[in-house]
Image: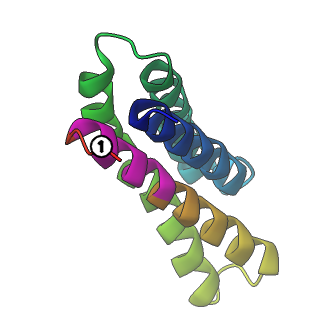
């Protein structure tokens, strides 16, 4: 498989996992996470389709993926400080952070031109 397509698949998968991890959390963090990971998903689709602006959107994903990850880290932090004793929040935050990691790996792969 082409490295550009692998980068797109990683970014799309990361965006989907990030959406799953932030969609049903607290209000301000859910909006932050959904918008950020939604854009990462869109950027991954553009990278996968080998659009001319793929390097530019991969650079944008390097910003938006960690921004969505902030929502996941905040969710984990709130849960462990006793504000929200929900096991679901631990699972959602972990899934979101894993998605952020996959999206960052794909964005770095595309932005820096890593070839297999």
Instruction: Tell me if 2 is positioned left or right of 64 in this view.
Output: right
Q: Residue at x 35, y 38 (%)?
A: 61
Q: Secondary structure at mark 1?
A: loop
- Residue in view at x 38 percent, y 52 percent: 104
Residue position for label 1 = 115
Q: Residue at 35%, 47% (x, y): give it.
A: 116
Number of other residues with Cα within 10 Å of mark 1, as a class: few under 14, some 14 to 19, many 20 or more: few
Relative to 114, residue 38 above or below: above
Q: Magenta: predominant secondary structure element?
A: helix
The picture places residue 93, in percent across and down from the top left corner, at 62, 68
Q: Is residue 38 above or below residue 11?
A: above
The image shows residue 13 at horizontal and vertical percentages of 61, 44
Scheme of colours in the image: rainbow
Q: Residue at x 52, y 24 (%)?
A: 42
Q: Residue furthest top?
A: 52
Instruction: Confirm whether the magenta stretch covers residue 22.
Output: no
**Which residue is at the front of the view, 74 or 111?**
111
From the viewer's perspective, tell me whether residue 78 is left or right of residue 46.
right
Q: Which residues are magenta?
A: 102-111
Closer-to-camera residue (25/104): 104
108 is within the stretch colored magenta? yes
């Amino acid at each position: 498989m082409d490295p550009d397509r692998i980068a797109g698949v990683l970014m799309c998968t990361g965006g989907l996992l990030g959406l799953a991890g932030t969609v049903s959390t607290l209000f301000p963090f859910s909006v932050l996470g959904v918008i950020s990971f939604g854009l990462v998903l869109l950027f991954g689709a553009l990278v996968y389709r080998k659009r001319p602006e793929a390097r530019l959107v991969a650079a944008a994903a390097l910003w938006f993926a960690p921004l969505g990850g902030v929502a996941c880290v905040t969710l984990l932090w709130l849960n462990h400080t006793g504000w929200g004793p929900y096991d679901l929040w631990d699972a959602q935050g972990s899934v979101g952070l894993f998605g952020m990691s996959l999206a960052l790996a794909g964005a770095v792969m595309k932005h820096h031109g890593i070839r297999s």
